[in-house]
């Protein structure tokens, strides 16, 4: 329960929360004033001063109008608090389902969590914010009004009210556990009943009715016991409301003669009763109902979502990489529990400033290796370190500043050329953007589009043109480790050479999943993947020691037509 409550508190964005609190202040005015207005209006009417009594009531109406303005602004600000929570939960559910699917684990309930449970958390979270806010406003307003009206009444009313509220909070943990027990009992009963009903013919034929009754009877009794336990919690909640809501009223009525004897006017006593009946009682009833209903739904549902999230989302990413060296120690990876490993016990070090080409037949694990190094996949065995730190311990910002990955299918979004190129370096100057475009050989493309301020239409670009824009984006990135996963496969050999040489000259390290033998020849070292057989070395060394590499080089021939790989505008 603490985890779920802590999540809700941390999700309160500072600025929207402050604005919501600021717009709540006008609502305190009518809350604090209605008891005072009723007291003075009553005394004025009893004294025959009708005009004064009407003036107090008119002032109360004006204060209510001011409170309505504040309430309207509060609802406008509520979305700024709630919608980011929904977005975070959606990412959590999807990330958890994807990671469990990749690991071959069951992803039952992911669709329900995404479509229904996330909406339950969002709605209950919004409702709890409003209810708690209203409760705080009411208590502050009533306390202010009582102190200005007659402090002695506040001393009689406030302590039992707070006692009842504190008692209702104390039983929330018990209520949460019993709701979870009720849900578990309901699931057990459903499973047992479904199993029994599915085999009813066989049970009847075998004369096993007594066994079936016993099989279903136990979960029925367990479910009934769980419901009785919930009923006891409801009784405790009623007792808490009696203490906090009705006891202050009884105390005030019992102390009425004593208060009148000490100079408290009839209007003041009526004002105190008004604060209790129209302020404290409804506020306590509402907050107890909300915490006991929406609050428990929020805790239980959010708990299921957090339990289903990816493990690395639960960790607090506080580590800082010491450098941009990539190290793999005994790394294995399989796409499923029963699947054959794509990589097995791989040891690899990519030092700072290194230029490594990765080659091998299709499906051998080259892209998997790139995703492991970049932290997009978690190894099923061994360790991956970026700057001596596991990628999952790096925050999103630090990870983005440490490595950049360009996949084979380059992504370009609608926006200007400058927006696309500077996406990973939002503070880049126009001159830096131009230099990145020129370095990777995209200047002619950008000129044809209309310059860096021109709008990019992804559907109007060919695959090679999209790759050029993505390469410029990665080149401008502050990340010192660049990983090109066949990121130039749609470029002609000359364009590929220019782009790779630009990245090789860029400060940092470069890993290229090679598409042509020329990429391997430009690298300082070459990694040959061949199932369990892994070789690392220079071109000449591998020609002697690796039969697979010799075979790959023999099949990597220049294209028959020089213009086959050239980029052309998409039709």
Image: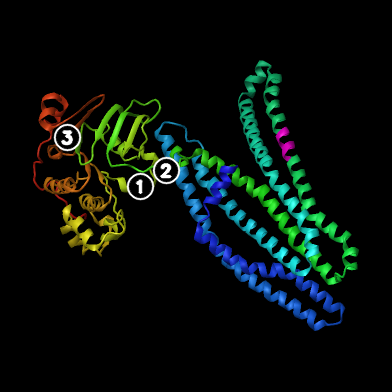
Farthest top residue? 206
Image: 336 above or below 284: above
Left or right side of 234 for 260:
right
Magenta span: 224-230
* Residue at 78% from the left image edge and 65% from the top image edge: 151
- Which quarter of the rendered picture does the N terminus lie within? top right
The residue at the point 51 percent across, 46 percent down is 115
Residue linked to disc 3: 525
Label 1 with label 2: CB-CB less than 8 Å: yes
- Mark nearer the N terminus (1 vs 2): 2
Q: Label 1 neighbourhood size at 10 Å, few (<14), some (14-19), many (20+)?
A: some
* Apparent side of residue 141 relative to residue 111 in the rendered image (left or right): right
Q: Badge 2 is on which residue?
A: 317
Q: Is residue 50 visible?
A: yes
Q: Residues within 10 Å of mark 2 (few under 14, many from 20)?
A: some
Circle nearer the N terminus (3, 2): 2
Secondary structure under tag 2 reads loop
Q: Are marks 1 and 3 in contact (CB under 8 Å)?
A: no
* Mark sitting on residue 186: none
């Amino acid at each position: 329960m603490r985890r779920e409550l802590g999540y809700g508190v941390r999700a309160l964005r500072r600025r929207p929360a402050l604005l919501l609190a600021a717009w709540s202040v006008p609502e305190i005015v009518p809350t604090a004033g209605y008891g005072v207005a009723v007291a003075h209006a009553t005394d004025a009417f009893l004294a025959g001063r009708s005009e004064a009594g009407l003036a107090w009531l008119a002032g109360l109406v004006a204060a209510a109008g001011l409170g309505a303005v504040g309430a309207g602004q509060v609802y406008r600000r509520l979305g700024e608090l709630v919608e980011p929570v929904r977005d975070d939960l959606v990412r959590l559910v999807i990330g958890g389902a994807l990671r469990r699917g990749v690991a071959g684990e069951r992803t039952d309930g992911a669709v329900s969590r995404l479509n229904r449970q996330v909406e339950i958390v969002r709605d209950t979270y919004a409702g709890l914010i409003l209810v708690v806010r209203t409760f705080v406003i009411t208590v502050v307003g009533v306390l202010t009004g009582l102190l200005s009206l007659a402090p002695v009444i506040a001393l009689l009313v406030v302590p039992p009210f707070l006692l009842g509220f504190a008692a209702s909070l104390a039983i929330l943990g018990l209520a949460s556990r019993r709701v979870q027990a009720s849900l578990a009992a309901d699931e057990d009963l459903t499973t047992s009943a479904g199993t029994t009903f599915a085999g009813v013919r066989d049970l009847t034929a075998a004369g096993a009715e007594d066994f079936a009754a016993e099989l279903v009877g136990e979960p029925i009794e367990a479910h009934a016991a769980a419901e009785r336990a919930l009923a006891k919690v409801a009784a405790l909640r009623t007792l808490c409301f009696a203490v906090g809501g009705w006891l202050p009223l009884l105390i005030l009525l019992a102390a009425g003669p004593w208060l009148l004897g000490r100079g408290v006017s009839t209007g003041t006593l009526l004002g105190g009763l008004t604060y209790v009946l129209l302020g404290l009682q409804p506020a306590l009833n509402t907050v107890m109902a909300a915490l006991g209903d929406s609050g428990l739904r929020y805790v239980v549902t959010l708990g299921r979502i957090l339990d289903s999230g990816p493990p690395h989302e639960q960790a607090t990413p506080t580590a800082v990489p010491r450098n941009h060296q990539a190290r793999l120690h005994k790394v294995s990876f399989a796409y499923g529990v029963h699947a054959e490993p794509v990589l097995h016990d791989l040891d690899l070090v990519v030092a700072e400033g290194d230029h490594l080409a990765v080659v091998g037949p299709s499906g051998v694990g080259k892209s998997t290796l790139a995703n492991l190094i970049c932290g997009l996949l978690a190894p099923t065995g061994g360790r991956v370190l970026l700057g001596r730190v596991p990628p999952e311990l790096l925050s999103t910002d630090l990870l983005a500043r440490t490595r950049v990955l360009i996949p084979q299918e380059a992504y370009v979004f609608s926006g200007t050329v400058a927006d696309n190129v500077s996406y990973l370096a939002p503070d880049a100057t126009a001159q830096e953007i131009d230099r990145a475009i020129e370095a990777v050989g995209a200047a002619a493309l950008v000129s044809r589009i209309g310059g860096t301020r021109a709008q990019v239409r992804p559907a109007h670009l060919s695959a090679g043109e999209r790759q050029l824009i993505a390469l410029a984006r990665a080149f401008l990135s502050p990340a010192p480790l660049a990983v090109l996963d066949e990121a130039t496969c749609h470029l002609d050999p000359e364009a590929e050479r220019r782009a790779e040489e630009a990245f090789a000259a860029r400060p940092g390290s470069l890993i290229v999943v090679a598409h042509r033998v020329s990429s391997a020849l430009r690298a300082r070292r070459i990694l040959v993947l061949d199932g369990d057989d892994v070789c690392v070395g220079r071109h000449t060394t591998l020609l002697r020691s690796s039969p697979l590499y010799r075979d790959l080089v023999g099949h990597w021939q220049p294209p028959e037509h020089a213009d086959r790989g050239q980029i052309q505008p998409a039709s």
